[in-house]
Image (cartoon, helix red, strand yellow):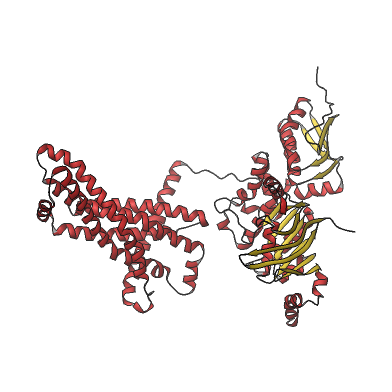
Amino acid sequence: MEKTNSKEVFIAPEKDFIYRFQDNTLYLSKSLLLPQTIWLTKKIPKEIRSFKVKSVVLNLDELQNIDSAGVMALFHLKDKLKKMGISARIEGGSKSILEKIDLFSPGHLPAHEIPVKAGFLERTGDAVSYFFTEFVFGFITLAADVFYWSVADIFRSRSRREGEVANQAVLIGVNASLIVIFMSFVIGLVIALQSSGQLRNFGANIYIVDLTVIAMMSQMGPLITAILVAGRSGSSIAAEIATMKVTAELNALKTMGLNPIRFVVVPKLYACLITMPFLIIFANVSGILGGGVAAYIYLDITPEIFTNRMALVMQNKDLITGFVKSQVYASLIVLTGSFFGFRVERGAEGVGKVTTTAVVVAISLVILADSILGLLFY
Amino acid sequence: MNKEKVIEVIGLGASFDDTVVLSDVTFSACKGDITVVLGASGSGKSTVLNHLLGLIPVEKGYVSVLGKDISNITEAEQLNLYLQMGVFYQSGALLNSMTVGENVALPLKQHSNLPDSLIEEIVYMKLGLVHLQHAFHLYPSQLSGGMLKRAALARAIVMDPPLLFCDEPGAGLDPVSLASLDELIVNLQKQLGISVVLVTHEVTSIMRIADRIVFLDNGIVVFEGSLKNALESDIDSVKQFFSVINEADRYK
């Protein structure tokens, strides 16, 4: 049977909303509120199209109630029909319905602005320029500020926060010592364990001492310590400063005439510079101890032989290298944590973001610095 | 003519640990009115609001919102009630990780099957009502205090709720922004025909927008009635509260 353009439709589940199509007119009755708008956006356009009409009138005479979603859906239907080649106009409606339509009419809405997408070269150029100006230059500027205030702080002890360096030393150094000792012991043990099989094959058991001591003192000890401190304290420094910025504490410091870098960053830098060498010594000792345990168990090297050989292998240079590395790593960790902490944007989410970035960047910088220092002190 | 009650509170009591915050709170709010719950700091205003919002369970007394007894309500009924109310928080409480447009669209996206294009148009229109269309793509951190409040208001009314709760909407705003926000609330209330329950202690705001006053003092309602009657009240705490206006008049 061919469809006519006269059809009456009653929607059973939606008792609050009735529509019918008759003589090129869509009559909407009762309420057109948010739950009912789905009919106007989904079903009704399809039905009108099936009648193959050129124009349609949307009659609101029987409509008793409408909300903003209903008004928008009405205009949405009109636009949709237009795209189908069917012209539509709204007619009728009580005073209150017309007032709502007037209030919620989308006629004054501005057209959506479609941002012009930059080309590949432009985007690459922008990204490189942004990286150098925002990150490299920003990091260098912060480093210069921190260096200035850390030197200036030595000569202005009166206005220094009393006990803050000691407090930070406990947080950054003392509280990290157990995890550093434990991890270094395990790593020293594993290095010696993995090497013992190979050395035994060549009858070079005694060289397990050389391997463990050199590996721990010149590379593994400082590196493990720096990675652990970056993960533990770097994140905490970034989160603390970021939270202070978000809660306007940094602004409060500034308006009180206090320099945030001196007040917040410098004590952390001092604390990290002071405690890092000790942490590296702990890491070296426990790593070598771990290697000694493995050497005793797997290669029958007694503690006496181990210590005698160790005295021959150890060099002052390794101690100096370890100290220099400790100072470089400490500076990198504190500077990276502070840099990203100061860059926080968008509240709570931003704090999480800068904290993660600070840890990743700090560890990457530490490894990069380790490679450079490794080459310099080789 | 008796107006329909959108909120009815009878004998509401609340205490935290051993501290009694509300003793015997009784009041009602009528359809189409702006009812202002006011009182000094610590008088129990926020506790009353949190009860009305279902954030604190009613342990003593009777509380009805839009005809629903919320002291004995299921989770599904509470959710249904939330869809019929908009809440405008003191801090705006916009989600910082989303743009203003996304924030305002959030309730519609969660609770309707409307196509995204239509939701976007509704959001544009609602932002237009609070004069904030230009902020559609901005993040909350890029807005001023006044803009943040207006964006929060747009989110509160996006579902066309019959009932709007406002928790200290003017807090932290300068007098000009506060006046403009008050005007906006009054206009929206008239245009949308919604009922508003507003908690505040901003005297200037109260003078501009209140239809009815509920005055709390030490956890009890000491006055309930029209603004005119409140200004003429003989109750000490009410008189003291509104005396600020008289003091301001002296400098005119």
Counting labels gives 0
Estimate the x, y position of residue A105 in percent, counting from the top left.
75, 47
Quarter of the rendering containing residue B211:
bottom right
Residue A1 image point, x, y percent: 81, 17
Question: Quick check: can you spot residue B222?
Answer: yes
Please tell me whether residue A213 is drawn above or below residue A173 in the rendered image.
above
Residue B112: % across, % down: 68, 41
Quarter location, residue B185: bottom right
Task: List the single residue furthest toward the bottom.
Answer: B250
Q: Is residue A220 left or right of residue B197?
A: left
Occupied quadrant, residue B236 = bottom right
Q: Is residue A283 above or below residue B230?
A: above
Quadrant assignment for the N terminus of chain B: bottom right
In this picture, residue B134 sits left or right of residue A359: right
The picture places residue B220, in percent across and down from the top left corner, at 73, 69
Q: Quadrant of the C terminus of chain B?
A: bottom right
